[in-house]
Amino acid sequence: MIYWNIFLAFFIPGILGYGGGPASIPLVENEVVDRYGWYTVQEFSQILALGNSLPGPIATKMAGYIGYDVGGVLGAIIAVFATVAPSLILMIILLKILLKYKNSPKVKRLTSYVRPIIAILLGVMAWDFFVESYEGIGIWQTVGIGVISFFMIERWRIHPAIVIVAAFVYGGLVLG
């Protein structure tokens, strides 16, 4: 029964918490503090502070911690799954609908409208990364890393994940 309660404690906020992790935090608090009584408000605030201090999505970090604390390893797995399950289910349903109507002129027109928007968003993100890098390490390091990365990916056909790891290692050893 505890695993079912863990599932519900994170699945319900996942459905109702429109806006991602920060929007679902009060809903999770309601479940784990008020409904099930696993934590006090102070304990929950400490879990929230711990989750905020670590990188990554807050909802899954909190789910993993609370699930593990309440139900062990299986509890952590169930809690994390319950947190991502609503989005996963919705994506599967939407993908099936999209695949069903993929040859529809309306869907093709919609995707033709979305592609430039995605390209612009990616361009803005790349520009923001460039500006932050320029301000942090200077123009020569930024351009050097960019040019070398370009050649590694385009000329030498090195997998992008390896290029990213190489840039992390360079940043840690030379720039850190």
Image (spheres, grey):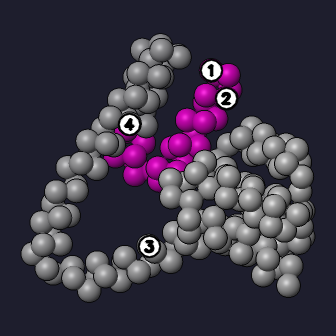
Residue type at mark 1: give it. Leu
Q: Gap between marks 4 and 2, in whole Å? A: 23 Å
Query: Which secondary structure lies at badge 3?
Result: helix
Up-down relation of residue 41 to residue 30 (above or below):
above
C-alpha distance separating marks 1 and 4: 22 Å
Residue 106, position as x, y percentages in the image? 12, 72
Question: Which residue in the structure is indicated by mark 4?
Answer: 125
Among numbered discs 1 and 3, the one appearing first in the sequence: 3
Residue located beneath label 2 in the image: 172
- Give the label, 3 or 4, closer to the camera: 3
Q: Is residue 65 magenta?
A: no
Tell me which secondary structure the magenta stretch mostly adopts: helix
Of the pair 99 and 31, the residue shown nearer to us: 31
Q: Which residue is mark 1?
A: 175
User: For numbered disc 1, what is the local secondary structure?
Assistant: helix
> Of helix, strand and loop, which one carries label 2?
helix
Earlier residue among tags 3 and 4: 3
- 2 or 3: tag closer to the N-terminus: 3
Quadrant position of residue 165: top right
| Quarter of the figure that contains the N terminus | bottom right
Give the residue type at disc 2: Gly
Front position in the image: 3 or 135: 3
Provide the residue span drawn in magenta.
150-176
Q: Earlier in the sequence, mark 1 or mark 4?
A: 4
